[in-house]
Amino acid sequence: MDIPQITQKPTTITFIGAGNMARSLIVGLLQDKANVVLRVADPDLQQLDAIHKHWPDVLTTTDNLEAMQGADVVVLAVKPQIMCAVTETLAEAAQRSRPLFISIAAGIREAALNRWLGGNQAIVRCMPNTPALVQAGATGLYANPQASEKQRSVAESILRAVGITLWFDDEIKLDAVTAISGSGPAYFFLVMEAMQTAAEQLGIRAEDAHLLIMQTALGAAKLALESGDMPAELRHKVTSKGGTTEAALKVLTGGGLQDLFVQALQAAESRSRELAAANS
Ligand SMILES: NC(=O)C1=CN([C@@H]2O[C@H](COP(=O)(O)OP(=O)(O)OC[C@H]3O[C@@H](n4cnc5c(N)ncnc54)[C@H](OP(=O)(O)O)[C@@H]3O)[C@@H](O)[C@H]2O)C=CC1
Ligand SMILES: O=C(O)[C@@H]1CCC=N1
């Protein structure tokens, strides 16, 4: 990946929070061999030790301010519920050093982040997903007016190193992106789990079922991405009249699967808005 350099040196990226999503981004960036220096701050020493053991080049600390010192980019990767408390402690340093902030938190609006950070900060909000770990992520991005073209480009390059990126001019759209691709991997994992249980009940060995299901999921996604056909068309091509797929799909549609997905995505989007309202 070619991250446009803010300085002559490699871009220094500090992660505040070393949880599931931050680790996915860190590992994805390391695999991409990006020209970056990575630092991570988290209160959990065990978490930090595990990172340091696997990736000794990643600098780890329990001190957020120490990690932020001199950083070009600060990725805010804590839970939405503690974002206010965490960012307020960074405000003074942020006013001095003015890094680019990238928030990955669901819901939390740029205006709130900017206020907590003391105002007039360059902020890119983004909604990535955990397949970033294997460089197959999908990220929606939104930049505030204070973020320069170069900073937008740096943010995009970081997220593009771990998957595809899409910009949105309207920040509110990130609530829907959260419902679709941010939470999305979990919907597919649930389907995989359900198919696994069903396959074992049909007498297939667990490891055989796992392999068949994973390869089928991968093959379906690859075909949908690469064939040029829409999913409905691809589904028709699998479904022989009076055949096995038709029998299965009758059960799924009869059970209201499509409606359930509409309700599920609406629930996720609403929750993102609630998190914004509760933390504004
Ligand atoms: N998981 C996902 O798929 C996605 C998550 N996100 C967003 O990413 C953010 C993190 O989520 P996720 O990774 O799942 O959550 P995790 O709980 O796994 O990660 C949050 C991390 O922040 C640490 N932390 C707590 N307090 C502080 C502090 N004061 N300073 C620094 N670090 C702190 C936590 O430590 P401890 O555990 O010790 O409290 C934990 O390691 C959220 O805002 C979420 O909305 C966005 C897209 C997808
Ligand atoms: O569940 C959550 O709130 C976070 C945001 C998207 C995925 N995980």
Image (cartoon, rainbow, N blue to C red):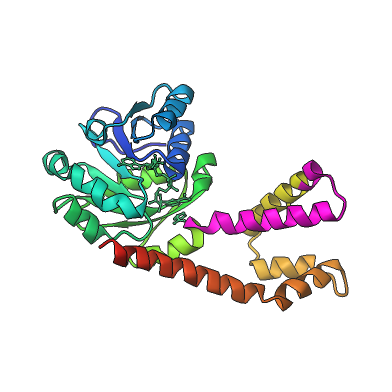
- For the stretch drawn in magenta, what is the main secondary structure? helix
Residue in the foreground of this view, choosing between 273 and 227: 273
Residue in the foreground of this view, choosing between 40 and 246: 40
- Name which quarter of the figure residue 58 lies in: top left
Above or below 115: residue 44: above
Residue depicted at 42% across the width and 66% down the height? 271
Residue 273 in sight from this viewpoint: yes
Q: Is residue 19 part of the magenta span, yes or no?
A: no
Question: Which quadrant is the C terminus positioned in?
Answer: bottom left
- Name which quarter of the figure residue 46 lies in: top left
Left or right: 209, with 13 as reference point? right
Left or right: 214, with 280 as reference point? right
Residue 226 in sight from this viewpoint: no
Residue depicted at 72% across the width and 67% down the height? 235
The residue segment tinted magenta is 182-209
Image coordinates of residue 73 in percent, x first then y, are 27, 40
Q: Count all numbered tags in the image, as a single digit.
A: 0
Residue in the foreground of this view, choosing between 243 and 17: 17
Image coordinates of residue 269 in percent, x first then y, are 44, 68
Image coordinates of residue 104 in percent, x first then y, are 36, 50
Left or right: 219, with 267 as reference point? right
Residue in the foreground of this view, choosing between 138 and 81: 81
Q: Is residue 200 part of the magenta span, yes or no?
A: yes
Question: Which quadrant is the N terminus positioned in?
Answer: top left
Residue depicted at 87% across the width and 70% down the height? 243
- Name which quarter of the figure residue 96 lies in: top left
Image coordinates of residue 214 in percent, x first then y, are 70, 48
